[in-house]
Amino acid sequence: MSDFSREWLALREPADADARADDLLIPLRAHLGARDLVIRDLGSGTGSMARWLSPRLLTPHRWVLTDRDPDLLAHAAVPGAVTELRDLTSLTPEDLAGTSLVTGSALLDLLTEVEVTRLAEICVKARCPVLFVLSVSGKVDLDPPDPLDERVTSAFNAHQRRTVAGRALLGPDAVTVMARVFEDLGATVHRCSSPWHLGPNRPELTTAWLQGWLGAACEQDEGLVEVAGAYLRRRLARPLHATVHHEDLLAIPG
C-alpha cells in the first residue's frame, strides 16, 4: 500500500475519482468565487487530483504540482501545469503567496502530527483554503466476511500508525487531528466520507489492494504470515466486495 509507482497510481485513479466527495465542492466554490485560481497540489504524483478537480471548477485556474518523486512529475499529464520537485514538509507561508487553494490526495495519513499541524498553520497564515481527500479512516467492510478480517484490519491500522525513521505516522487518525488543528486556528472545517467500492467490476485493483493490505498487516503482525496464504486463497476463490473507507476534508481559514 506504500507503492507510489506510476502503475499503481494509474490503476487506482478511476476508483479515486469515483470516491472523492463532490459535496465539498459546493462550499469550496462559494469561497473561491469567480477569480482566477492558482492551485498547489501536494504529493501530486502524475496529477490525478488535477484531472478530477479541473472540470469541476467554474473559473479559470492553473496548477502547481508538487512532489518529491522526479519520475512521477516527469510523467505529469495536466495541461499548463508547473511542476515543483520538493518535499512538502519544507513549505513556508511565503511559498503559498498567490496560491488560491492547496490540495492533496491520499496524503494526510502519511504525515505526522507535527507535520500536519505545521501544514495547517502555514495554510491559515497564508489564508489559503485546503482540500485534502482520500485519507484512510481505518475501516474496511468485506463481503463475504472471514474470521481473520478483524485481525488483518487491526494490524493494517497499526502499520499505518507505525514509526518510520523517527516519524510517528498518523494513519487513520490524520483527518481528525488536522480538523482539530484547523478548528483551533479558527478555520471552518467540512468533512465527508469518500469510500472506495471494490469488487468484480474492478478485479485488478481489488486484487492489488487486497494483496497490499494483507502484506502491510503481515509486516506489522508477524503471526499473520503463516495464515496469510490461506486467507488470500480463500478471498480470491470467490467474488469479493470491499468498501475501503476514506475521508475528505475541506478547511477554510476564518
Image: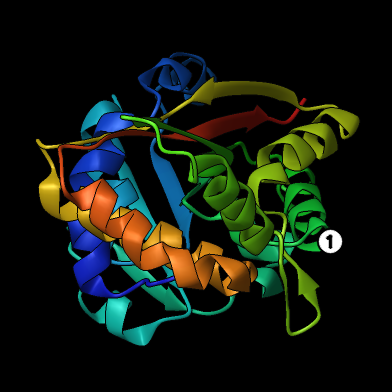
Q: Split into 4 quadrants, where in the image is the N terminus?
A: bottom left
Looking at the picture, does residue 209 appear above or below residue 238? below
Q: Is residue 93 left or right of residue 200?
A: right
Looking at the picture, does residue 41 appear above or below residue 134? below
Q: Around disc 1, counting alpha carbons within 10 Å, would you say few (fewer than 14), some (14 to 19), or many (20 or more)? A: few
User: Is 32 or 52 nearer to us in this picture?
Assistant: 52
Residue for point 36% across, 85% down: 70
Q: Quadrant of residue 72?
A: bottom left
- Residue 60 seen in the figure: no
- Secondary structure under tag 1 reads helix
* Picture coordinates of residue 192, whole percent (x, y): 53, 21
* Picture coordinates of residue 210, whole percent (x, y): 33, 54
- Residue 195 seen in the figure: yes
Residue type, label 1:
Val
Residue for point 53% across, 32% down: 247
Residue for point 63% across, 65% down: 95
User: Is 100 or 201 nearer to us in this picture?
Assistant: 201
Residue for point 29% across, 75% down: 5
Q: Quadrant of residue 230?
A: bottom left
* Picture coordinates of residue 244, whole percent (x, y): 41, 37
Looking at the picture, does residue 189 appear above or below residue 173? above
Q: Outermost residue, right direction?
A: 184
User: Is 48 or 95 nearer to us in this picture?
Assistant: 48
Q: Is residue 251 left or right of residue 124?
A: left
Q: Is residue 37 left or right of residue 143?
A: right
Residue bearing the label numbered 1: 114
* Picture coordinates of residue 93, whole percent (x, y): 73, 59
